Image: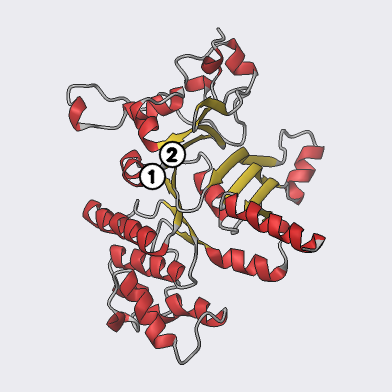
Amino acid sequence: MTAEAEIGRRARVADSTAPMIELRGVSKQFRKTLDLAGRIAQRLGANVREEVVHAVDNVDLAVKQGEVVGLVGESGCGKSTLGRMVAGILPASSGTILWKGQDVKTLPPEQAKAAKLAIQMIFQDPYASLNPRLRVDRIIGEAPLVHGLVTQGEFDAYLAQQMRRAGLDPAFKRRYPHQFSGGQRQRIGIARALAVQPEFIVCDEAVAALDVSIQAQILNLFMDLRRDLNLTYLFISHDLGVVEHLSDRVVIMYLGRIVEEAPAEDVFASPNHPYTQALLTGVPRIDSRKRAFSAVRGEIPSPLNPPSGCHFHPRCPHAMARCREEAPKLKAIAPGRRSACHLNDGAA
C-alpha cells in the first residue's frame, strides 16, 4: 500500500468514528455599524457606539450519527442562530464547524455541495418559510431537480413519494401553501427537506406554531422518519415536554452559552445546573400535582451587554462572588454529562 493510500484509509477510518456534526469554539456576533448620522453624533460627543449582539458564545457541541439532540433554552438565548450555523445558513464569526470530521470551510467544492444538501432545516413558521407564489410541486421538487437527484422523467413519481412520506396526498401537488392547514404546511416543509435526501435535519421549533393534537402527529412523523431513513436531528425547542419525548441527549443553552449537557433521562431526573433546575421547576407533572410552580426569576439579560462572569449569576439563587467575576468552564461532571457551574468545584 502506498503512503497516499494509507493516509486516505486512515482519513476514512477517522471520518467513520467522528461525530456527524461538531462545533469547536463557535461564536456568532451581529454588528450594527454606525451610519453617517451616528458617526457625526459620536464626533460631537454623543454617547453612541457600534452595537454588537453576542448571539452565540464559544460553543462546543458534537452530534453523533443517529442521535436526536434536544437544544433547549429561553427565547433569545441563541438556539436558532446556532441551528442556522449548523445548517450553513449563517457563517460563524469564529470557531470551527466540522462535517464528519472535516472543516466545512476547507471542503472541496463537490464535497461542500454534498454537505450542504446533507444538512437541511425545518423552520418554526410553516407559512413564512414557504414561497406563497409557488405551487407545492415546485416547493418540494425544484431542489432535487436542480441538483440532479432526479430526472424530469422521474420527477412525478419522486414527488409523489416525498409527499406520501410526509403524510401528504400527491393529488394536492398543484395547490398553493395558503390552501393548506398549518399542520399540512409543516408537512410540506418536511417533504421539501427530505426531497434532497439529507442525513442531518435541524428542526427549529418545528412544532411550536401547531395545535397540540397536530404537534403529536408531527412528532410521531419525525420519529418514523428517523427509523426509516436513519436521520440525525438537532431538535431546537423551548418545550421541555417535547424534548423529553424525542431526545436521546439534551443540551441546555443560556445567553449564547451551553450550561449543561447530558442524556435526556439524566437531565430530567437530576438536573445539575441551577438554570436547568429552574427550567424544570416550571414544568407541570402528573406526579407533582400539589407542588407550586414558578418561572425562572428575572428576565434574560440583553445579548448586547451580557453580564460578566457566569451569564446566569444575576438570576441564580446560588450566585457568589466568583460567579460575577469568572465564567465557569463546561466540563465533565460524570460519564456523558457536562455542566458549567462553579458549584461543581465545591468552591464557596
Residue 278 locus on image (x, y percent): 39, 25
- Location of the N terminus (image quadrant): bottom right
Q: Return the residue nearer the eye: 128 or 309.
A: 309
Secondary structure category for the residue under label 2:
strand
- Is residue 73 found left or right of 179 in the rendered image? right
The label number, if any, that marks residue 147 in the structure image: none
Secondary structure category for the residue under label 1:
loop
Residue 182 locus on image (x, y percent): 30, 63
Q: Return the residue nearer the eye: 247 or 12.
A: 12
208 vs 24: above or below: below
Residue type at mark 2 is Val
Label 2, label 1: how many angstroms apart (C-alpha)?
A: 7 Å
- Location of the C terminus (image quadrant): top right
Q: Return the residue nearer the eye: 13 or 23.
A: 13
- Is residue 284 found left or right of 62 in the rendered image? left
At x 50%, y 53%, the residue is 65
Colour scheme of the rendered structure = secondary structure
Snapshot quadrant of residue 188: bottom left
Determine crowd level at label 1: few under 14, some 14-19, many 20+ residues with C-alpha closer than 10 A.
many
Q: Are marks 2 and 1 in contact (CB under 8 Å)?
A: yes
- Residue occupied by mark 1: 247
At x 54%, y 21%, the residue is 341
Residue type at mark 1 is Ser
Residue 328 locus on image (x, y percent): 60, 23
Residue 301 locus on image (x, y percent): 53, 30
- Residue occupied by mark 2: 250
125 vs 151: above or below: above
